[in-house]
Amino acid sequence: MQAKKADALRTEWGDRPCDHPALAKEYAEGKRTGDYVCTQCGAKVSFRERAEILASRRT
Ligand SMILES: [Zn+2]
């Protein structure tokens, strides 16, 4: 997902809680940033945070 789109999502989503059901790789100007973004709320999630989210779902 483009970083700009994630920004727009974040603005739209506001302060509502989100458990980040789906994470997409973040791109800026056609390049991977190395981070991920939530496709629902637009939150930026680092590689490490993503691993923690995925691990917490496995239990
Ligand atoms: Zn989210």
Image (cartoon, rainbow, N blue to C red):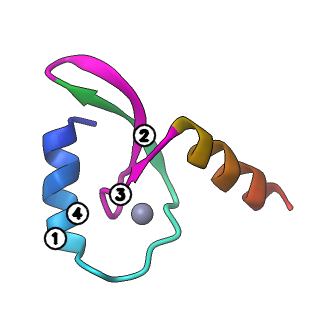
For badge 4, the amino acid type reads Arg
Foreground of the two, 24 or 46:
46
Label 2 vs 3, first from the N-terminus = 2
Q: Quadrant of residue 34?
A: top left
Q: Marks 4 and 2: in contact by CB < 8 Å?
A: no
Q: Marks 2 and 1: in contact by CB < 8 Å?
A: no
Label 3 vs 1, first from the N-terminus = 1
Residue that numbered label 2 is attached to: 36
Q: Marks 3 and 2: in contact by CB < 8 Å?
A: no
Foreground of the two, 10 or 48:
48
Mark carried by residue 43: 3
* Image region (quadrant) for ligand 1: bottom left
In the rendered image, the quadrant that contains the N terminus is: top left
**Residue at the image position 13 percent from the left and 42 percent from the top:** 4
**Residue at the image position 58 percent from the left and 45 percent from the top:** 50
Say which element carries label 4. Answer: helix
For badge 3, the amino acid type reads Ala
Residue that numbered label 1 is attached to: 12
Residue 31 is inside the magenta segment: yes
For badge 1, the amino acid type reads Glu
Residue that numbered label 4 is attached to: 10
Label 1 vs 2, first from the N-terminus = 1
Say left or right for 22 vs 25: right
